[in-house]
């Protein structure tokens, strides 16, 4: 099968197994080039392990610190006529590289929100690892079925309180235009919190502790994005923001409930990057294209793997973590500082349909978008006939 990207809106409906493997290898090479990283995790559970920050966390844990990693993801396998999801191929590549380097790696594929997957994970930990000393929570899903009630909730990307009109960029039509988003109802806010808030993170830690597989002084973190003024109306102060606030509640609850084990729980605020989740959010393709331009000029641009290595080195296993007044780890300072934001805001005010490609780094944005699905990587022959039937 010769595989070329099929892009629809904010998603690519196929992926390239060789390209995904090259992307994973690139991240592994970066981590291994850093040399000895010092003390770190031993047995790591990554919930949402197959793409973006979750994948980078698994790579950093395994190839940076030599940790055994157990991953949870929800990915579609390939068929003879259709490729797998990118996360499937990423995970297959990770397993292959881990095996080459004699690193323990197991992955459970299924709905991380369900009690059945939690039970399967716990059984695997008991069988192979004994206990976990780091839990990474990196899920991004549009829906969640509550395992207690059976009710399915769907998240909404809407402002809170009043309608919001702003600039956005339509990647399909290559068009900068205004978009108006109507405010969310109370039910939409509550449903978004159920999907994207801290309830499931809390339930994972409860289940692991009850099963006796959490190590003393276990660390856990859930990833979030806070942003600044330009993105607050659709992110920080919108339905997503309300859900992310619930992560703060969950972190405090985890610390309180599991004080006997001295569990250390923090939300980690990371910088804006091209991910499958961020591509779906109005405003973000335009905003990210502009921050890429500014931060590359400043020499401060980082991708997922650089951000996560920094998080491990300075916060999770560092002596002087950067914490805000909500006890969150902050890895977004190079983006959210006032000087950088002023430059981004100046470009935002100037950008039009006519000058968008001149003022932004959309080429960089589009490269990173296609790379998520294994396309556009150097050294990969995209005209070659490849077998999509990759397993792990």
Image (tube, rainbow, N blue to C red):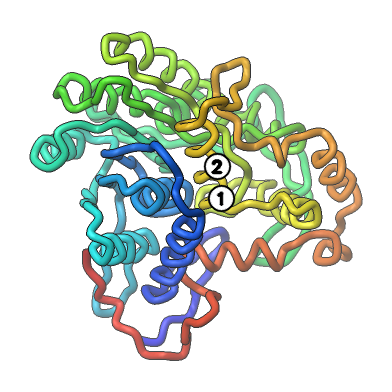
Q: Is residue 185 left or right of residue 357?
A: left
Task: Give how far across and how far down residue 309 sits, in percent.
Answer: 51, 45
Q: Residue furthest left?
A: 127
Q: Is there CB contact under 8 Å for labels 1 and 2?
A: yes
Q: Name the disc covering residue 306, or none.
A: 1
Q: Could you classify mark 2 by the number of other residues whose Cα lies within 10 Å: few (under 14), some (14-19), or many (20 or more)?
A: some
Q: Quadrant of residue 144?
A: top left
Q: Could you classify mark 1 by the number of other residues whose Cα lies within 10 Å: few (under 14), some (14-19), or many (20 or more)?
A: some
The quadrant of the image that shows the N terminus is: bottom left
Task: Give how far across and how far down residue 382 sits, in percent.
Answer: 47, 85
- Give the labeled residue for mark 2: 310
Q: Name the disc covering residue 235, or none.
A: none
How many circles with numbers are drawn on the protein?
2
Q: Residue furthest bottom?
A: 384
The structure residue drawn at horizontal position 26% and vertical position 20%, both measured from the top left corner, is 216
The structure residue drawn at horizontal position 85% and vertical position 60%, both measured from the top left corner, is 359
Residue 147 vs residue 20, the one in the foreground: 20
Residue 268 vs residue 239, the one in the foreground: 268
Q: Quadrant of residue 170?
A: bottom right
The structure residue drawn at horizontal position 29% and vertical position 39%, both measured from the top left corner, is 42
Query: Can residue 142 be seen?
Result: no
SS label for mark 1? helix
């Amino acid at each position: 099968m010769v595989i070329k990207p099929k892009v629809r809106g904010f998603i690519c409906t196929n992926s390239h197994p060789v390209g995904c493997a090259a992307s994973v290898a690139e991240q592994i090479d970066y981590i291994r080039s850093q040399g000895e990283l010092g003390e770190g995790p031993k047995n790591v559970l990554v919930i949402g392990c197959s793409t973006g920050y979750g994948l980078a966390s698994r790579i950093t844990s395994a190839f940076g610190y030599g940790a055994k990693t157990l991953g949870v993801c929800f990915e579609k396998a390939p068929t003879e006529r259709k490729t797998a999801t990118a996360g499937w191929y990423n995970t297959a590549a990770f397993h292959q590289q881990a095996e080459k380097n004699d690193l323990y790696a197991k992955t459970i594929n299924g709905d991380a929100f369900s009690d059945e997957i939690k039970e399967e994970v716990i059984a695997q930990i008991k069988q192979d690892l004994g206990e976990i000393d780091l839990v990474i929570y990196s899920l991004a899903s549009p829906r969640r079925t509550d395992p207690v009630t059976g009710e399915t909730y769907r998240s909404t990307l809407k402002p809170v309180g009043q309608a919001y009109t702003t600039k956005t960029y339509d990647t399909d039509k290559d068009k900068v235009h205004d978009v108006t988003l109507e405010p969310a109802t109370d039910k939409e806010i509550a449903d978004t919190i159920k999907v994207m808030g801290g309830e499931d993170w809390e339930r994972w830690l409860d289940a692991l502790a009850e099963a006796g597989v959490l190590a003393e002084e276990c660390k856990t973190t859930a990833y979030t994005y806070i942003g600044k003024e330009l993105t607050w109306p659709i992110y920080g102060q919108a339905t997503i923001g309300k859900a992310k606030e619930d992560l703060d509640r969950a972190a405090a609850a985890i610390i309180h409930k599991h004080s006997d084990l001295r569990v250390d729980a923090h939300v980690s605020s990371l910088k804006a990057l091209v991910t499958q989740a961020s591509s779906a959010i109005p405003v973000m393709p335009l905003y990210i294209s502009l921050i890429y331009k500014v931060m590359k000029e400043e020499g401060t641009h980082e991708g997922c793997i650089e951000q996560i290595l920094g998080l491990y080195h300075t916060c999770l296993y560092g002596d002087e973590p950067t914490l805000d007044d909500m006890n969150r780890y902050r890895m977004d300072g190079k983006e959210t500082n006032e000087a950088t934001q002023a430059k981004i805001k100046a470009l935002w005010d100037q950008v039009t349909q006519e000058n968008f490609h001149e003022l932004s780094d959309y080429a960089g944005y589009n490269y990173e978008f296609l790379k998520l699905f294994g396309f556009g990587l150097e050294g990969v022959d995209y005209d070659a006939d490849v077998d999509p039937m990759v397993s792990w």
